[in-house]
Amino acid sequence: MRKLTLVLISDLRESEENRHLYDPSSDSDIEALAESIKKRGLLHPPVITEDKIIISGHRRVNACLWLGKKSIRCRIEPITYRKNKEKFLKLLREANRQRVKKISEIIHEEVVDSSSNRGGSYNLELNRIESSEIDIEEMEIVGEKRRFQIKGNKPLLDAAVKVINELRDYWPLSDRQIHYKLLNDPPLKNKNDPKSVYRNDAASYHLLTNILTRGRLFKLIPWESIGDETRPFVSWNLYNNTSPFIKKQFDGFMKGYHRNFLQSQPNWIEIMAEKLTLGSIIRPVAIKYHLPYTIGRGYSSINPRHDLAVRFEESGKEKFVTLILSDLDPDGDEIAQSFARSMRDDFDIKSIYPIKVALTWEQVNDLQLPTSPDRKAKSESKNFNKYIKKYKSNDIWELEALTPQQFQKILDEAVRRVINIDLFNQEMEEEKSEHIELNKYREQVLKTIQSEKEVNP
């Protein structure tokens, strides 16, 4: 803690930035604060620069003047206003961060922050007390459930943690992805049983899912590393007050522009995937090429297919190219076929070009992918005989058997084979020049708002 220094109030000055950012306090505000200082003393000394410019405590200084004081104890920051303008402005903002402000003050704060590419969060206190009483009968919780600590299964936990860390760039992961990765170097399931090697079977997989659950509950595994996108959460974009809303608007002002890189392509291209759990792996490739994608979650319902047909019709493109991602099993093969048939026959898209990007029989053999841990092909499936006849095997493979790197490489290569790369690169170059132009306009608008404040303080 820096020592306090007695300073003449007549030597203290308000900065130009403070006058532009914050409205002056009314006489009633100063009088009330002066009464508080008179009763309790000055609890929080003002903070000033070495050249006597006030950083924090403008109202306290004015209140002391109101009381007739000639000097005041201040804490001096080791900077000067003239030589350290950027640091001064940062300290000024920090000093005022928790003060309740008018909307106009918040707006002009964000103009300053946006102009200098600096952000900040707000922690304004609300003068509202809400009751926590609940006027409805609560449900009685019956029984008790306790999770056992991980002891004998620690080799499996350690191996899973290693996999999770190796695949950090692809979080959130699914349990299935971790399972297949463990098969490359199978750990022991129980340290006390040298024969309990992790295998590609249902028992091993179910033990893994239990270990992953307990690992997260006991804070041994980062919660965000594993996701479950099959159970979506819905919330609303709400704010506690205007401060974070205004900040968000200025932070993103004229910054969210993305040019459609595929607008000059002759064909309409979309990705259709069977599994929601693969969304985090598909998304980076889709974003790179600005490709829309649909997660069908098995056989896609009629609504997503209808919406896709509308998008293709409105695009005015010559052909519809769909890149399909599904398991290699009786239903996975049929999902690809059923989707393509429906787009052709139900929605009359004769120029459809369906491509099974993954999984294929060639990929399974070339990459030596492990089969599914849970099951063989189900004989009761109506597509069973067709599958056996085609592949001469009742083994099945899942998309998760591909590593995230393999998956993205396969999808990226497929995209590059169906787009015109030269046209794509031209659109990217055009976007760069557009961003330069947009930044110029953004700076002009922010300067205009700041100038308005200077004219009408």
Image (spheres, helix red, strand yellow):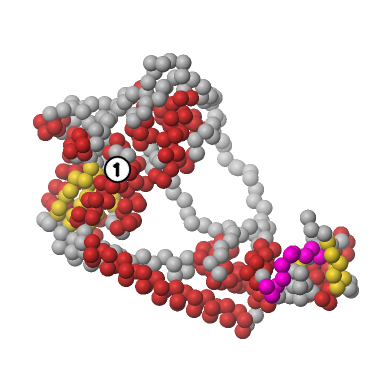
Location of residue 114 in the rendering, given as x and y in whole percent from the top left corner: 54, 69
Location of residue 448 in the rendering, given as x and y in whole percent from the top left corner: 53, 80
- Three-letter residue code for mark 1: Gln
Location of residue 344 in the rendering, given as x and y in whole percent from the top left corner: 13, 52
**Residue drawn where x is 12% and y is 51% of the image:** 345
**Residue drawn where x is 23% and y is 61% of the image:** 421
**Residue drawn where x is 57% and y is 37% of the image:** 137
Q: Quadrant of residue 267?
A: bottom left
Most extreme residue toward the bottom is 455
Q: Can I make out residue 310 in this image?
A: no
**Tag 1's secondary structure?**
helix
Question: Where 264 sits versus 356, above or below?
Answer: below
Q: Quick one: quadrant of the N terminus?
A: bottom right
Q: Quadrant of residue 203?
A: top left
Q: Is residue 127 left or right of residue 36?
A: left
Question: Where 423 sits versus 416, above or below?
Answer: below
Residue position marked by numbered label 1 in the rendering: 406
Q: Is residue 206 magenta?
A: no
**Residue drawn where x is 61% and y is 84% of the image:** 455
Which stretch did the figure color magenta? 74-83
